[in-house]
Amino acid sequence: MRITDSLSGINAFVQSVDSGSFALAAKRLHLTRSAVAKTIARLEERLGTRLFHRTTRTLNLTEDGQAFYERCVRALAELEAGHAALESGQREPTGLLRVTAPLLFGRYAVAPALLQLSDAHPRLSVDLSLSDNVVDIVGSGYDLAVRIGALPDSATLASRRLGVQRMLICASPHYLAKHGSPNTIDQLSGHRAIAYGQNGNPVPWPLRDDNGHALEVAIDARLCFDDLQAIADAAAGGHGLAWLPCWLASSYLKRGELIQVLDCAHTASVDVHVLWPQTRHLPAKTRSAIDILVEEVPISLNSLAGAA
């Protein structure tokens, strides 16, 4: 068996292991499940060994399959690095750039930057997915991800800080005239709040006490939305206090629809990062996207937070 023959089907094999099923691997590779299964079967026939223990519900590696998988991952990484090294010599970013970002922040700050990138490089295609769900960057095939908040330790991802998202607590003039304005963190407990959360689980507000110590405040959240825009609109409508990023609240503050309460020193700020799969050589498209995000996102954060 020639080496070139053994390479056939390796990508399908690795994708099947990483995703846990032929069906998900087929989706990632834009193939049918049957095509992936047949490719794996032919690979096993060429290798003369079984790579998977197959049942109706599970797909587990055999001992030979595990050893082969580890070598395949290293081989594909080397091929990707070689391709990226060649591409890095090109000045013009080309191909498809896939980016994922939080829904509203992506709309406010990430999409405008990527539009600039697309206009500057006609041979580059951009696929931007906006969602508040945290996706597996490597497993889902993304080149970049913009994340807000603390990052978990990862040996497979690299990151760069883009800026700081500042937060504030605010409410409408009508709500404050009727219920009063809280002057301390303790007084928040006497107010209605509109919380961010999913499946009816409101996220506590991360705040700081008078000594600067971090604490999480559980609020009386009669309203719990999983969309920041809906929270801002509800707060402007007089339905309670809201904990919002400055870039979102700023337009409401300018129009007088919301008023900030408490001091900014009591609200915790969070970092904004861009992440990408760790590699020896960055493709030109990825490097160019990182560069423009590093340049443009801080401008968006600062300008949109200026009114707060």
Image (spheres, grey):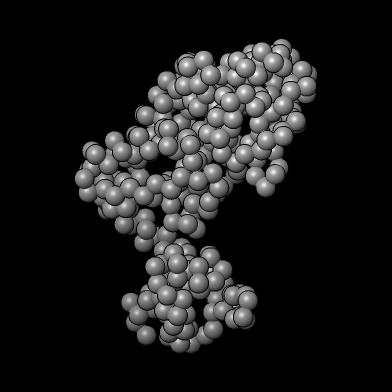
Tell me where residue 262 appears, x and y as whole percent. 66, 14
Q: Is residue 108 above or below residue 37?
A: above
Tell how many labels.
0
Residue 69 in view? no
Residue shown at 35% from the left, 45% from the top: 286
User: In the rendered view, does 244 fall on the left or right side of 304?
Assistant: right
Q: Is residue 240 above or below residue 287?
A: above
User: In the rendered view, does 260 fall on the left or right side of 286?
Assistant: right
Quadrant of residue 171 within the rendered picture? top right
Tell me where residue 144 appears, x and y as whole percent. 43, 46
Which residue is at the front of the view, 16 or 201?
A: 201
Which residue is at the front of the view, 38 or 176?
A: 176
Residue 104 in view? yes
Question: Which image quarter holds the N terminus?
Answer: bottom left
Tell me where residue 176 appears, x and y as whole percent. 66, 15
Quadrant of residue 261 within the rendered picture? top right
Residue shown at 33% from the left, 57% from the top: 82
